[in-house]
Amino acid sequence: MMDIEALRATLRTLVGEAHVLTDGDLTAYEQDWRKRERGRALAVVRPGTTEEVAAVVKACGAAGVSLVPQGGNTGMVVGSIPDASGTQVLLSLQRLNRIRAIDAANLTVTVEAGCVLQTLQEACEKDGFLFPLSLAAEGSCTIGGNLATNAGGTQVVRYGNTRELCLGLEVVTAQGEVWSGLTGLRKDNTGYDLRHLFIGSEGTLGVITAATLRMYPLPAAQLTAFAAVPSLDAAVQLLGLAHQHLNAGLTGFEVMGDFALGLVRKHFPQQNVPFGGMSPYCVVLENSDHESESHAREQFERLLEAALEQGCVLDAVVAENIAQARALWHIRESIPLAQAQEGLNIKHDISIAVSRIPAFVTEVDALLEQHFPGVRLVNYGHLGDGNLHYNVQAPDGADAEAFLRDQEGPINTLVYEVVDRFNGSISAEHGIGSLKREKLAHHKSPVALNAMRAIKGALDPKNLMNPGRVLSIE
């Protein structure tokens, strides 16, 4: 039988007594970001170096105790908190927060897993570079969590997911060994690319402790436009025109349903949301230019002229300065917060081929209204890369908690069945965690699931790394 106090004493010796938490308010570590679940940790351990992480992993492995790695605890799928058993060690990586090196010639930055995303963005910008990963939680999410979930965000259309931004990793394996692959090489054809196993694995194969990431030169100008469009088909048409007119300068393309924007108007009336109620959808798009602001503005003007002429835009505004651009982006980023103010909801983070999104939304909208009359659809997301946050709010006046409890299962089944018919994915950027684990078993190919289980069994044969997440292990 495990000697809990002996393990806690060992952990205190390894990382220092102040960094092994067992008493007091541990809500920040034990409750998931959406406040759907609360776990209980045997201990919260906060190592300060990669060597300390390795030592903690070895000690827990010797005791047969499972670990749950955690960064900023901003995940959406209940994947980074302990279960309720009180037998798991919560491994917080927030003290591993250094930026180790910026290599200007190689256009790379090497950073530890606990570094907050916004801190990394600001450090790169100070040296004249862009780190393009951008998402609503960037003030609190960490690089390790971004990598573990292969986070997306608002600039995937130009720069790709976190996976595309990563050139190397440092990882502590389930056996407590350290794999250092922080080379920063763009070409390394020497066998299996191990970094891609750990990116997106949600801490189930090992603990990411550092990464070497791509940087880009800062653009000379970034311009933002906000446009009202008559339909989702028109939004897709506008995206095609944006690719033609802006080329690689198109760095963001977000779509927002009018009900989603209406929640921002309702709960954050101080925000000036353009085109109130004049169209079913609006789009915010960004053009980054490496020549000049005047060149970027000329490109936008030509794009919007063509869009107005073809009828895929009803009206549009272009930000005149950085403050206006931030205000337009803040509208988009406020939708999840406004939705939370409105009450509990059923979230879907799905991806569909861009060309098929209008047909998908038409079909699912109709099915939900048929089977769940009165539901309100908070539809918004990253149209540029085919990722929708297609969320379902309870009917107006209904008990939101009861709606979530009683209808989440049936609604998820309906939505995900249509996602399958459209050859999409039930998780675009949030991951699987424990929330979607059982759904994954029904929507992933058995061949793929068997391969994933084989990898898990090979790298973590004792199933001690974040068990119960992503895969069901018999």
Image (spheres, grey):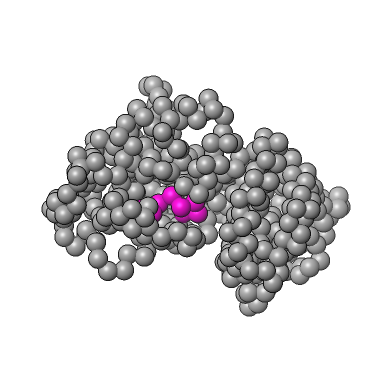
Residue 303 visible in the current orientation? no
The magenta span reads: 75-82
Location of residue 272 (image quadrant): bottom right
Q: Residue at x 86, y 50 (%)?
A: 310
In x, y percent, where is residue 384?
A: 66, 46
Q: Residue at x 56, y 33 (%)?
A: 444
> In the rendered view, would you say 302 is above or below 354?
below
Residue farthest bottom in this picture: 270
* Residue at (26% x, 44% y) in the render: 65
Residue 329 falls in which quadrant of the image? bottom right
Asked whether residue 76 is drawn in magenta, I would say yes
Total of numbered circles in the picture? 0
Give left or right: position of 314 versus 10. Answer: right
Horizontally, is 411 left or right of 47 in the view? right
Quadrant housing the N terminus: top left
Query: Picture coordinates of residue 41 (x, y %)?
Result: 30, 56
Q: Main secondary structure of the magenta part?
A: loop
- Residue 37, picture quadrant: bottom left
At x 45%, y 38%, the residue is 471
Q: Is residue 399 left or right of residue 115?
A: right
Q: Nearer the viewer, residue 82 or 73?
A: 82
Q: Nearer the viewer, residue 211 or 175?
A: 175
Do we see residue 41 in this rendering? yes
Q: Is 223 or 31 nearer to us in this picture?
A: 31
**Quadrant showing the C terminus:** top left
